[in-house]
Amino acid sequence: MPKLTKKLIDATPTPQPGSKPLILNDSDVKGLSIRIMPTGQRSFMLYYRTASHKERRPKLGDYPILTPEKARDIARDMLAEVRRGADPSLQRQDERKAATLAEFATRFMAEHTDAKRKARTAEEYQRLLDKHILPALGKQRVADIDRTEVTKLHHKLRATPYQANRVLAVLSKMFNLAERWGVRPDGTNPCRHVEKYAERKVERFLSDVELRVLGETLTAMEEERTAPTTAIAAVRLLIFTGCRLNEIVTLQWEHVDLPNGCLRLPDSKTGAKLVHLNAPARDVLAKLPRQPGNPHVVAGFTEGGHLQSMENIWQRIRMRATVALWEAYPESAPGKLVVDLKTRLKCQPAHTEVAAEASAVGIKLPVGLTDVRLHDLRHSFASVGAAAGMALPIIGKLLGHTQAATTHRYAHLAADPVRRANDLIGRRLAEAMSAQEQPNVVEVEFQVTNSSR
């Protein structure tokens, strides 16, 4: 019987799927063992008998969060309680059931979220806990929270359906784990049967005119140096690759493979990802200078860091592009307003100046590009492909989707070429049917007959 050490535990292979768990006993503390499941989960266990000869096998914690040394300390303390006639396993169950949601949330984040979820997901879970869940339910015992209280919290957030549903999802996961960890009885998750709110998917696609205006704005700001070169490059890469914002701003040069025309991302929302680079994207990367000592493509203002202020810079870009979009339609009221201001000021007016002038004369301005999020550039990448008749699976592959349903949102755009073809056929048929010269019709019928032989 060996002593349980980190080296021994790490070196022990995981049992084959479908086989029994592997138990390794500790030579130092009698009853202490580690259980290795076919799933790869490794947990410290303690076997003992109570004063009334009842067998107990409580779980002490999961490895490597719980180290062998700490597991031995916990086991020794529990065995000392057993010798005094206590039943520490039963006491721990009672303590867990008495835990408040705030106390349980700490364990939830440490043992589940931080250990098994991506850092950005963990940050979002913590934000939802701090802002919505704990202020409402944090002081209540996990075992006492019922469906009425969950429904009340969900209903309170009804003005923001997406947020309400994310809160419900996090709570549901917490209560599922509470059942698994023995804090609540099985089948008592209070989130069950709480109906989610319908969510309106925001799908904003840039038109050809909007893309042209945005491109001109990026070029102008780059030449004037009114925005960082790396930020301009980041926006262009978002447009040309369809990548997510975090994938671009955290991109490192070691992940860029220009000779083979691709990005080899070691991690993304869906895991490791290969991004194919088209010619415009390759050109952006080829022209972007590297900062000595900084591994990031979109270098920031701190030593070795990436750009952190993309949203603020994007706000300036889309405001300026909106003014340019209004000016692109000089016959419209907003367009005339921009042209007149430009003439008076002898320079391109800012969005705030146009808005003030419009308010003064009672003109309602269209939103332009002010509602365009950086993520909408990804939607626009996909919409161009769909409208061009590309198959949805191909578009999904380019975007790195793992679920076909995610790409299906562009199905209505993919139908546009079909509609155009249908309109063309209908127009040709109508023209043929309304032709004045009868011989032409006969000739067509004769050709069809011959071709069918």
Image (cartoon, rainbow, N blue to C red):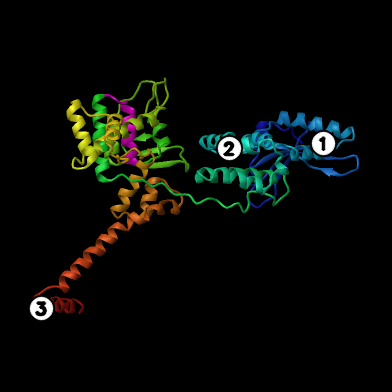
Instruction: Tell me which label, 2 or 3, sits earlier in the chain.
Output: 2
Instruction: Answer with mark 1 or mark 3, whichever residue precedes in sequence.
Output: 1
Q: Residues within 10 Å of mark 1 (few under 14, many from 20)?
A: some
Whether 370 is among the magenta residues is: no
- Taking the spot 30% from the left edge, 33% from the top edge, the residue there is 355
Quadrant in the picture for residue 60? top right
The amino acid on which the numbered mark 1 sits, given as a three-letter code, is: Pro
Upstream in sequence: badge 1 or badge 2:
1
Of helix, strand and loop, which mostly describes the magenta segment?
helix
Q: Are marks 2 and 3 in contact (CB under 8 Å)?
A: no
What residue would you read off at disc 1?
Answer: 88
Asked whether disc 1 touches disc 2, contact meaning CB atoms under 8 Å apart, the reply is no
Instruction: Inspect this view and state whether residue 389 appears.
Output: yes
Which portion, as a residue range, is magenta? 225-241
Q: Quadrant of the N terminus?
A: top right
Q: Estimate the spatial distance between the alpha carbons at disc 2 and disc 3, rounded to whole Å.
A: 76 Å
**166 sits to left or right of 266:** right
- Amino acid bearing label 3: Gln
Residue that numbered label 3 is attached to: 438
Q: Is residue 261 visible?
A: no
- In x, y percent, where is residue 365? 29, 39
Please say if 47 is above or below 187: above
Q: In this view, does 143 lie above or below 320?
A: below
Q: Is residue 345 left or right of residue 285?
A: left
